[in-house]
């Protein structure tokens, strides 16, 4: 059973495509599930490291009394609380942001959708505005330069990155040839 474009787009995506007059949606590119799973696991490991550190700090505070016990407790609590905060932040916010990140290829352009806190940030690129897609000097990422806007970076964590880049280059050339 193949996954169709209709299964990948939400009602919100259809409204975005329609509102920006980009024509029919042709394909959707999201981040690799393995990358999202990795981020979730890293967030949990950091969080639970903070929990374990916190437990050890509290147990050692009550078990071993010393002259400067309060200072040692604070010294141990700060990294533990920071790890719990950072792990929770990665787990809740960054994983949610990664799940929502996508590129929607349409007939007249593309939508680059990413999440900033509680809202989606949508960048619209029309094919006529694509100047070039270049590979970064180091790494496997690409960046799209366009007229009147900042570059968009496509990291290697996108599924089918080479196909995405080739589609953008092809569509950009088609628009350039028709001018």
Image (cartoon, helix red, strand yellow):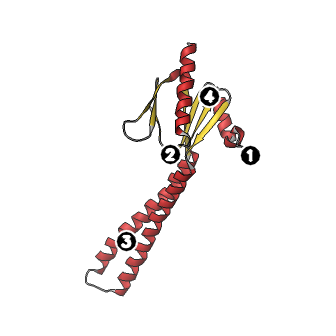
Which one is closest to the eye, mark 3 or mark 2?
2
Q: In 3D space, how far apart are the residues under numbered discs 2 and 1 (Cα atoms)?
A: 25 Å
**In the depicted structure, whether residue 7 falls above or below residue 88:** above
Residue at disc 4, secondary structure: loop
Q: Which residue is mark 4?
A: 20
Which one is closest to the eye, mark 3 or mark 1?
1
Label count reads: 4
Q: Which residue is mark 2?
A: 157
Looking at the image, which residue is at 39% across and 69% down? 80
Q: Check disc 4: other Cα within 10 Å, few if <14, some if 14-19, many if 20+.
A: some
Residue at the outermost top position: 179
Q: In 3D space, how far apart are the residues under numbered discs 2 and 4 (Cα atoms)?
A: 27 Å
Tell me residue 14's x, y (percent): 68, 35
Whichever of callouts 3 and 2 sits on the residue coming sooner in the sequence is 3
Q: In 3D space, how far apart are the residues under numbered discs 1 and 4 (Cα atoms)?
A: 31 Å
**In the depicted structure, whether residue 36 falls above or below residue 55:** above
Whichever of callouts 2 and 4 sits on the residue coming sooner in the sequence is 4
Q: Which residue is mark 3?
A: 77
Q: Which residue is mark 1?
A: 1
Q: Check disc 1: other Cα within 10 Å, few if <14, some if 14-19, many if 20+.
A: few
């Amino acid at each position: 059973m193949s996954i169709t474009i209709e299964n990948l787009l939400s009602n919100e995506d259809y409204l975005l495509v329609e509102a920006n007059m980009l024509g029919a949606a042709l394909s959707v590119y999201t981040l690799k599930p393995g990358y999202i799973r990795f981020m979730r696991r890293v967030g949990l490991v950091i969080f639970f490291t903070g929990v374990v550190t916190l437990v050890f700090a509290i147990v050692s505070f009550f078990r071993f009394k010393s002259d400067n016990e309060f200072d040692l407790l604070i010294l141990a609590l700060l990294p533990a609380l920071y790890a719990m905060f950072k792990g929770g932040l990665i787990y809740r916010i960054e994983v949610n942001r990664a799940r929502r990140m996508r590129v929607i290829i349409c007939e007249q352009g593309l939508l680059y959708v990413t999440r900033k806190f509680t809202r989606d940030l949508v960048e619209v690129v029309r094919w006529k505005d694509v100047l070039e897609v270049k590979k970064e000097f180091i790494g496997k990422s690409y960046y799209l330069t366009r007229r009147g806007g900042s570059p968009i970076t496509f990291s290697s964590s996108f599924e089918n990155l080479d196909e995405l880049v080739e589609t953008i280059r092809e569509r950009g050339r088609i628009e350039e040839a028709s001018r």
